Amino acid sequence: MNDIGWIDGVLGAARPQAVGALLRYFRDLDLAEEAFQEACLRALKTWPQNGPPRDPAAWLIFVGRNAAMDDVRRRTRQVPLPDEAELSDLDDAEHAMAERLDSSHYRDDILRLLFICCHAELPATQQIALALRIVCGLSVAQIARAFLVGEAAMEQRITRAKARIAKADVPFETPGAAERAERLDLVSAMIYLLFNEGYSSRYEEAGQRLKLAEEAIRLARLLLRAFPAEPEVMGLLALMLLQQARAAARFDDDGSIVLLEDQDRSRWNGAMIAEGLALIDKAVRHRRPGPYQIQAAIAALHARAARAQDTDWAEIDLLYANLERLQPSPVVTLNRAVAVSKVRGPAAALALIEPLEARLSSYFYFHGVRGALLDQLERRGEARASFDRAITLANSPAEAAHIRQHLDRLERKTS
């Protein structure tokens, strides 16, 4: 295999399992990260010729653990380094290692690590930032973008969190039942952010990054097993299932973005939708509404509409209004504006989002939505400026191409 672009997706998808297991072995964040990075370097060296191993996570854990142990031995001069050939010949060793790891439930190390990162020694913002960096492998830029803050500020949060954990000598053990309950909200937030990192991937990465979304769904199932009567965990899992059900319809054959209202609903995953609807119906019966339940209820309204024009936008507007009260956020208001535009028109929606401009000035979707509303109001010069700004902030070629389509239509109207 000469094209090594595929390796990045495989390494990213395997990272949560690998880092979680390496941390369990070494109980040191920096050492676990260094071991994983060394394993990645060796993967880049050997996988292009040999292809990916049967279990990439097991391979990375095995190679990373050996590399870290070799480094410790080299520094202490207790044991000589083994030959490189011994480390590279993993045909039989990899299979045996995978068997041992599976028998010790290494795949559940991620959930353990998420709870550890939510340790009470850390402020909430540092907990989430650390988990997204260590567990999920998101870049500082990706995490900063998710929280609408600068990269430098996010880098400081992560550095402080790692230093605080090292100083406090935080034990890397599974927390008890009471601690798990206290940390549940943050763990849920991190699982959803992990899901979004996979679900919101670019068309070129969709196949590779899909495993991140699948891993988030798997973690949510584990979380629901630990908290079977918690409606917000039901809501979280329902939300992810209902969103993931639409994955196959999100891009056309050319890799262009297909908006929800234009998607071929026959390509939606019916089994996922059925499970998600059953979960949200069960959660609602507990009469303890929360943000994930409300978002899942919104997704359920889309899923239940046989055609885009059948969507109950008035109910979606009400649900977003409730979400604004429970979890005030400029992004929630921006999403609500789409429903408002369907119910009360573009002028009402524009009035709703205009106060958000200062806080969302660097947010791609704000300028895209604003441009579309201005276009509907025939304020074409302002619409063009918003679309231009959106293109400069696009996170992928597909996003930029989608906005260019709006610009092209706008130019045809004015010509």
Image (cartoon, rainbow, N blue to C red):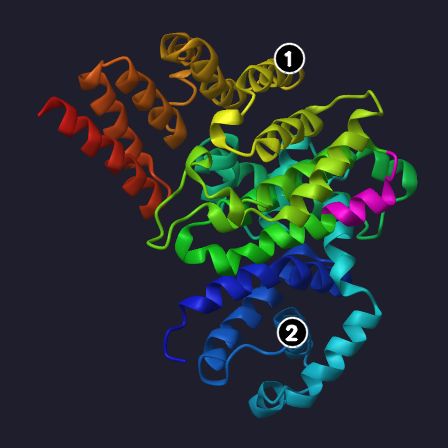
Residue drawn at 83 percent across, 68 percent down: 104
Dividing the picture into quarters, in which one does residue 211 lie?
Answer: bottom right
Question: Can the viewer see residue 407 in this picture?
Answer: yes
Query: Is residue 252 or residue 216 the one in the foreground?
Result: 252
Instruction: Answer with left or right where residue 87 lies relative to residue 185.
Output: left
Check the image and report above or below for 69 versus 158: below
Instruction: Answer with left or right where residue 265 lies relative to residue 103.
Output: left
The outermost residue toward the left is 415
Check the image and report above or below for 49 versus 214: below
Check the image and report above or below for 364 versus 330: below
Circle 2 residue: 55
Element under label 2? loop
Confirm whether the magenta stretch covers residue 312.
no
Dividing the picture into quarters, in which one does residue 35 lie?
Answer: bottom right
Residue drawn at 52 percent across, 46 percent down: 266
The type of residue carrying mark 2 is Asp
Read off the magenta span.
Answer: 220-229
Q: Position of residue 255 (x, y in %)?
A: 36, 52
Circle 1 residue: 325
Q: Position of residue 240 (x, y in %)?
A: 64, 41
Q: Position of residue 199 (x, y in %)?
A: 53, 46
